[in-house]
């Protein structure tokens, strides 16, 4: 069995991320960016595909925690003879070359004696490329260099011995002893960088995270969960470009053993726009500015060629490829890199971006000619797509349709354009936008509504419901307590809410999404229902569902994309920005209705 996702912690240096298990194995790490090739790919393969295990012989994990509001992980091990503290982190350097990335594993024997054990298997290109090795230095300053093509990784610290295709070693430690290992990546054709001062790197990394988190202003019963979610969203942001990945992993399945395995290491305009909403709602307009600059660069001078997702640097082509040499998480094949959905048209995307930028604008972020010009061009692009069917928010790989949620988001886009003119004095063809806004509103109420079932429906001409319909109230198309919304919610509860209290996206049994098999409840859908409950007066139902969903988060406060009540396990890519931003919205809604007035 693959290591449960609940066992993993996230490390991040704001360029890339690592997943380290409770038992001390780093099973996923891409260098130098979130969407680069993996040097540790055991998460979706085997240990031979790259990993770094650091554990304590005959030891058990007593506890683990993040140091305050950081991504610095501390794990305490106990044995019959002593206790050991392992600190894992990816340094956020003050002056480090951005083309160099590090991961540090520090071990301190707290009391007694213990034996620390390493097994390091360095591979490149998702386990398919074996590097050549060379050694330099000696003692605690030993260096092992691994080179394959454009990549070089160096391990600095007490020497490990190459044995059985991995570097291994055991170290006897007594109370007060400290050892540390520094794993660094840089382009193999560049000069070797100087080693950072490890203690200074740790100090600066902790200070960076604490200073950033100090600005978080959150109250209410779910404040700790909101804080960790905001930190996680920051950890998924590439600081050089401002791009926000949907998740740092690829091909973690939506169904154990199934084929719904996708690469999420890219910037979805929708997901990142919703992330910006969550950040702005808690005062982080600076992050919104960085993302807006990323957006300007990605879309560039031709919004008519706008895509639903991009690479972290704004790359447009993300061809989907399968890696047959990897067995997949829980034998879920294929393992994919790249994402074919990048070629889709999804009608809701412009609306998601416009809603996020309107929220930032209302929070005080000033527009300039470039940013507002981009938004006008996006609305012009959207106006040209009025008669175009799409693949929907869930990226259906079947036939295109007019999805009600997508058409409602088109309404939201024009609505925010109108508000920008009316409330902020910006320029634009406001009469045209008003007319299109009204046209789409009337259309949704006519074609997206089913009189027989008294509910909004998934797509025009259909009869099923979809959890994304819960966003109709969130964007302001209808009130949360509108009778049409309430009757839609009643049907969603009846048809999509499972016996464990989790909400499905839609009914996959019909095969209408063009994919075999099914999936488990998407956590953001349950959070959407929490918000709906809270804002329509069903506060006790909201709190009950909120507590149900939060109960499946990890001990470190992390959430994946989905949860399987059948297996009692998290599924999907991990950690998932969509889930965490949904948590923030739901918690904020509850805080607003519970706070004394």
Image: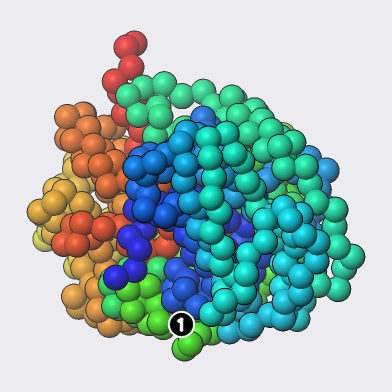
- According to the image, what is the colour scheme of the structure? rainbow
Quarter holding residue 589? top left
Q: Residue at x 61, y 62 (%)?
A: 34
In the rendered image, the quadrant that contains the C terminus is top left
In the rendered image, the quadrant that contains the N terminus is bottom left
Residue 152 visible to the viewer: no
Q: Position of residue 399 (x, y in %)?
A: 36, 82
Residue 142 visible to the viewer: yes
10 Å crowding of disc 1: few (<14), some (14-19), many (20+): many
Q: Position of residue 249 (x, y in %)?
A: 50, 64
Q: Which residue is mark 1?
A: 326
Q: Position of residue 287 (x, y in %)?
A: 65, 40
Q: Residue at x 42, y 62 (%)?
A: 573
Q: Is residue 440 left or right of residue 500?
A: right
Quarter holding residue 378? bottom right
Quarter holding residue 383? bottom right
Q: Is residue 355 left or right of residue 570?
A: right
Q: Is residue 146 above or below residue 236?
A: below
Mark 1 residue element:
loop
């Amino acid at each position: 069995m693959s290591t449960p996702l609940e066992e993993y912690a996230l490390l991040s240096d704001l360029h890339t991320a690592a997943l380290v298990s409770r038992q001390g194995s780093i099973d996923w790490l891409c260098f130098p960016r979130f969407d680069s090739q993996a040097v540790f790919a055991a998460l979706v393969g085997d240990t031979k595909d790259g990993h770094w295990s650091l554990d304590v012989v005959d030891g058990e994990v007593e506890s683990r925690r993040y140091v305050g509001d950081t991504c610095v992980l501390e794990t305490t091990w106990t044995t019959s003879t002593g206790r050991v503290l392992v600190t894992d982190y990816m340094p956020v350097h003050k002056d480090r070359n951005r083309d160099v990335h590090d991961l540090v594993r520090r071990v301190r024997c707290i009391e007694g004696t213990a034996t620390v054990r390493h097994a390091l298997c360095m591979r490149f290109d998702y386990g398919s490329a074996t590097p050549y090795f060379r050694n330099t230095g000696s003692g605690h300053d030993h260096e092992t260099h691994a080179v394959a093509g454009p990549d070089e990784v160096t391990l600095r610290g007490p020497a490990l011995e190459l044995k059985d295709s991995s570097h291994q070693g055991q170290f006897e430690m007594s109370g007060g002893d400290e050892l540390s290992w520094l794993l660094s990546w840089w382009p193999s054709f560049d000069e070797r960088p100087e080693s950072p001062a490890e203690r200074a790197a740790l100090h600066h990394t902790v200070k960076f995270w604490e200073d950033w988190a100090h600005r978080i202003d959150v109250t209410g019963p779910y404040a700790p969960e909101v804080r960790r979610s905001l930190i996680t969203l920051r950890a998924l942001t590439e600081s050089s470009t401002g791009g926000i990945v949907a998740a740092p992993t690829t091909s973690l399945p939506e169904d154990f053993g199934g084929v719904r395995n996708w690469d999420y290491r890219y910037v979805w305009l929708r997901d990142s726009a919703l992330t910006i909403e969550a950040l702005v709602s808690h005062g982080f307009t600076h992050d919104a500015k960085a993302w807006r600059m990323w957006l300007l660069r990605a879309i560039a001078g031709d919004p008519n060629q706008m895509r639903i997702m991009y690479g972290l640097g704004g790359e447009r082509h993300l061809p989907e490829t399968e890696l047959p040499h990897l067995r997949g998480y829980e034998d879920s094949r294929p393992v994919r890199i790249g994402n074919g959905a990048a070629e889709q048209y999804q009608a809701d995307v412009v609306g998601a971006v416009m809603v996020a930028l309107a929220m930032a604008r209302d929070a005080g972020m000033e527009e300039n000619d470039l940013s507002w010009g981009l938004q006008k061009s996006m609305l012009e692009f959207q106006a040209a797509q009025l008669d175009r069917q799409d693949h929907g928010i869930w990226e259906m790989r079947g036939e295109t349709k007019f999805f009600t949620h997508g058409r409602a988001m088109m309404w939201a886009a024009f609505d925010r354009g109108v508000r920008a003119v009316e409330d902020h004095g910006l320029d634009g063809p406001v009469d045209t936008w008003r007319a299109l806004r009204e046209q789409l509103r009337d259309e949704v109420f006519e074609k997206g509504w089913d009189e027989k079932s008294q509910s909004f429906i998934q797509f025009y001409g259909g009869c099923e419901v979809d959890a994304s319909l819960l966003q109709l109230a969130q964007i302001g198309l209808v009130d949360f307590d509108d009778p049409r919304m309430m009757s839609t919610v009643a049907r969603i509860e009846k048809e999509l809410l499972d016996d464990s209290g989790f909400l499905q996206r839609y009914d996959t049994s019909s095969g209408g999404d063009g994919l075999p098999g099914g999936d488990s409840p998407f956590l953001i859908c349950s959070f959407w229902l929490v918000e709906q409950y809270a804002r329509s007066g069903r506060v006790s139902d909201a709190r009950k569902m909120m507590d149900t969903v939060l109960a499946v988060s990890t001990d470190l406060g992390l959430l994946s994309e989905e949860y399987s009540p059948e297996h009692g396990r998290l599924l999907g890519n991990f950690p998932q920005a969509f889930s965490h931003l949904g948590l923030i919205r739901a918690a904020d809604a509850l805080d607003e209705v519970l706070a004394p007035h």
